């Protein structure tokens, strides 16, 4: 129930943000902004709150399982307790967990971490079906808008506004397959002007 409440509140916030005028628009994305997104999309993803991961500790079924990264960025594991996961890559979390288990419980733990479910994206504005959609690796702005039924007849055909996690506002990006989407992005299809 709490998960549904959180997602409902997040969607309401996303819709409220989409209704904001130019006050939340930081202007066009620079080439440096676009390059930073390309790099982030092509490197190992860093864990975020709201994601679901699978931890497998070889020959230790009691420690293995599926876990949610809570909104404050922590996971709670049996024996290991609460561990900060946000901002870490899968391999960094594997090392942290192996060290934690080695120092307290196991001789030579072999730990693997898999991201089962990324933080969702939100598509709002001038689209047919605004809402929350699952993130998939390699997602670009055209496929994200397609998930939402495409732009409405009033939607812009040239640009889109995107707010990445941690950004203070939305930036304008070209509507092209080269504009990549990251987990947790808020994508707004603005109204076009005739």
Image: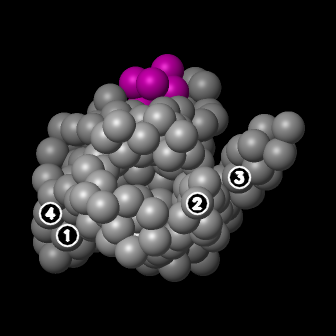
Identity of the residue drawn at 56% across and 45% down: 67
Cα distance between the residues tagged 3 and 1: 25 Å
The reply, left or right, for residue 54 in relation to residue 80 is left
Display colour scheme: one colour
What residue is shown with label 1? 36
Q: Is residue 50 visible?
A: no
Query: Image height check: is 89 above or below 87?
Result: above
Tell me if residue 182 comes above or below residue 164 in the rendering. Answer: above
Residue bearing the label numbered 2? 79
User: 121 or 93, which is in the foreground?
Assistant: 93
Badge 1 element: helix
Residue 10 is tagged as 3
> Marks 2/3: CA distance?
32 Å
The reply to whether the C-beta atoms of the residues labelled 1 and 2 are less than 8 Å apart is no
Labels 4 and 3: the sequence-earlier one? 3
Residue lying at 58% horizontally and 60% vertically, measured from the top left: 79
Q: Cα distance, mark 4 to mark 3?
A: 26 Å
Callout 2 touching callout 3 (CB < 8 Å): no
Picture disc at residue 39: 4
In the rendering, at what x and y percent does residue 22 appear? 56, 71
CB contact under 8 Å: marks 1 and 4: yes
Question: Where in the figure is residue 131, as x and y percent of width and height?
Answer: 63, 35
The vertical placement of 173 against 1, above or below, is below
Q: Residues within 10 Å of mark 2 (few under 14, many from 20)?
A: few
């Amino acid at each position: 129930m709490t998960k549904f409440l959180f997602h409902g509140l997040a969607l309401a916030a996303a819709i409220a943000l989409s209704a904001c005028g130019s006050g939340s628009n930081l202007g066009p994305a620079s080439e440096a902004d676009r390059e930073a997104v390309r790099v982030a999309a092509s490197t190992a993803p860093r864990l975020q709150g709201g994601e679901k991961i699978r931890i497998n500790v070889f020959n230790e079924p009691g420690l293995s399982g599926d876990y949610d990264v809570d909104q404050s960025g922590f996971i709670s594991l049996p024996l290991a307790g609460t561990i900060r996961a946000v901002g870490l890559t899968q391999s960094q979390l594997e090392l942290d967990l192996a060290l934690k288990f080695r120092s307290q419980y196991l001789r030579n733990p072999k730990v693997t971490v898999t991201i089962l479910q990324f933080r969702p994206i939100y598509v709002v504005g001038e689209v047919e079906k605004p809402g929350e959609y699952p993130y998939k690796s390699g997602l670009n702005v055209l496929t994200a808008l397609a998930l939402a039924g495409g732009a409405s007849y009033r939607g812009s055909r040239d640009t889109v506004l995107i707010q990445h996690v941690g950004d203070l506002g939305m930036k304008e990006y070209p509507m092209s397959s080269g504009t990549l989407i990251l987990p947790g992005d808020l994508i707004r299809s603005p109204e076009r002007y005739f």
